[in-house]
Structures are given as structure tokens and as C-alpha cells.
Amino acid sequence: MQRVFDIVLGSVGLVVIVGLIGWGFIYMLRKSDDPGKMFFKWAFTIPFIIGCILLAHKMGPFGPFLIVFMAVVLSFMWTPHIGEWIASPITNLFDGGDERPDKKPFYSAAITKRKLNKPFEAIVALREQLAKFPADFEGVTLLASIQAEDIQDLPGAEITFNHFCDRPDAPPLQVAAALTQLADWQLKLAQDAEAARAVLEKISARYPGTPLAAQAAQRIAHLGGTEKILLAAHDRQAVQVPAGVNNIGLLDSSKHLMPEETDPGLLAAEYVKQLEQHPRDTEAREKLAILYARHYQRLDLATLELAQMINEPDQPAKRVAHWLNLLADLQVHGGADYETARETLEKIVERYPDLPVADMARSRLNRLKLEIKGKKETPDMKLGDYEQNIGLKYGAPRRY
């Protein structure tokens, strides 16, 4: 029974030793910079050890000398690897260990060829890299830029971006950036505002109810003005410069030479017209709110305009905090009491307690009483002849 136990124990030990040797062989072969050389070392070491042990057993008293010789030979072969294995936990802290860096594309050759005015060669170099990394946004953008700007192939650039955007794993921010850049090219290179509008509408359709859709809507609202600027740049008219005033220093007053201020009523009508066409134009709505509060002393209408933007669910936190701070400014300068302004600023803390905008709101709340106290009293302005309830066209006031 004891003999059977010894045989089983010996067999298990042999299996463990062979397994460890096999694991070490595979591990070192995979980590080696020269697998062929490592394979040769193992192919020599294993037969060498077995042969020396068998020969030492037959040599009797001289066997230990053979074992010492074997150890010397193996030390020359394996000491560098053993030392590296022992020191690796420390060296890995500084050099990152034997982890291979992530593969990434290299666009230096394409960029150099583009700078040398060789766009087609640059495109070939880019496509070689994109064949290996088809989802790399940097390479896709560089390829589309060369197509659109260097060889005036805007349809080709559009195809390049569309292929990227149609990928199911394309990140939303990169898709929106690609489509926005394409819309810019449609305006700048093709002077086609409708094509730019169609591209931006893809963002709104693809990501409804998100900040990306809100930004796209804002861009769409101002396409008309951008198109006029671009067209004017291509069709410049001669500018008539009026003659200067002689002896201006001898005049009793130069007030009559100052340019006339734009009629606030006309500005308000212009903003309202813009908002009727583009209700999500936050820039126009913000300007209208400021005009209502500061010129016409209509804090109620200003609150209505700002509340519409604050209540939009897809607006970024930074923009909403900006409008709440602006409303607090208008309330302080419009004569609202402390509690009203405090409630406005506390909305920022309630909505975004963990964001930096909340810290800024808390800081302002601490000095809000001093801010109100330091406000200078200003006389009320008499309302002019304009449509008093012009802001009420957008519906009843909403709570923010």
C-alpha cells in the first residue's frame, strides 16, 4: 500500500514539475523579443539536464562534478532571464513593464505630403492607415479635409463622413462634429445654405432631445445671416465713405456727429420675427429678454423669455446656469427683492449640485445681499409706443 502511495505521489509531482516547465516555456517564449533564440535555449536545456543527471548517476563519485558543470553552463544561459524576472516588479513601476502599447495609426506621412502640395499621395497614405483603423475619427476628418479643401471634391468628403457616421459604433460627439464640419463646408465652399441646413437637420433627427440637437438648431437659426455674409464676400460693392468734418476741434458740440442708436422697438420687432421663424434661436431670445428688462423695465417679459430656454430639457447645464445667472442679474437690477433672486440662484444648485456651476451659484448666494445693497437706484423709464405684450406671443409664463 505504501508503495502505491509513493508511486501516485511521485507521478503527481512529476506532472506538476512538467506543467511548471511547460508553463515557463510558453510564457517566456511569448514575452521574448527573439522567440527563435528562446526556443533554441529550451530545446538545448531540457535534454542537457536529463543527460547530465543520467550520466552523473553512472559516474558514481564523480557525478557531483558533472552536476556543478551543468549548473555553470545553465547559469550563463539563464541568469539574465532569472534576474529580469526577479527585478520586473520594481522596473515595471517605471517603464510600464512588458505590456505592449496599443496599436494606433500614423498620419505623419500623409500630413507631410499634404504640406508638400501632394494631396493625392496624401490620400493614398491615409487610406492605407484607415484600412487598418477604419473607425479612427482623426484619420477620417483629415481625409475629408483634403478632399474638400485641397482637391475641391466636396461630394467625396461628404461620402467619407457619411461612411463614418453610418457606423453603428460611431460616438455621437464625433458624428455631430463631422456633420457640423460638413455643413460649414457646404456654406463656405459651395455657398449652399439649404444643403447645410439638411446636414444639420440630420443631427437633430439622429439625437433628438439632446444638447447636440439644441446646438444644431441654433446653427440652423443663423444660416440665413451666414449665407448673406458669404455672398457679400463674393460680390463686394463699393463703399462710399462720407467726407470728414472740417475743423472738428472748433465746433461747440460734436453730439450731432455721433451715430444714431438703433431704435429698441425695431430691435424687439426684429428679434420677435426671428423667433417666429426659429423658436429655438437662444441667442435672439436672450437678447430680447435683456432688451425687455433693461430698456423697457419689463422684468415679467424678460422672465418669460428666459424661462422658455431654461425649461428646454436638451440644453447643456452650462447654458441653463448662464440663463439663470442672467435672470438673477436682471432681477437685481430690476428692483426684485432678495427672495426672488435667491430662488433663481438656488435653481442652479438644485439642478446641478455636483457641477462647478453649483459652486459658483453658492458663492454668489453668499454675497447676494451685498450685491443688492450696492445696486444704484435708477429712475424708471417711461415706456415708448410699441407693442406692450410683444413677448406674450409665445404663450403664458412658465415656471423655471
Image: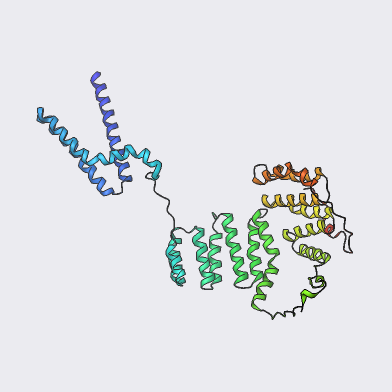
Residue at far front of view: 250
Q: Tell me if residue 343 comes above or below residue 165 in the rendering.
A: above
Q: Residue at x 66, y 62 (%)?
A: 201
> Residue 291 appears at what percent x and percent y?
80, 59
> Which sits in the foreground, 21 or 106?
106
> Which sits in the foreground, 304 or 61?
304
Instruction: Using the rendered image of the protein, determine whether residue 394 is visible from the camera's viewpoint.
Output: no
Q: How is the image coloured?
A: rainbow
Quarter the N terminus occupies: top left
Q: Splitting the image into 4 quarters, where does residue 159 fall? A: bottom right
Instruction: Using the rendered image of the protein, determine whether residue 173 is visible from the camera's viewpoint.
Output: yes
> Which sits in the foreground, 276 or 319?
319
Q: Residue at x 46, y 69 (%)?
A: 115
> Residue 383 appears at what percent x and percent y?
89, 60
> Residue 165 appears at what percent x and percent y?
56, 60
Q: Is residue 397 left or right of residue 238?
A: right
Q: Tell me if residue 235 comes above or below residue 141 in the rendering.
A: below
Q: Splitting the image into 4 quarters, where does residue 212 fall? A: bottom right
> Residue 294 appears at what percent x and percent y?
81, 57
Label count reads 0
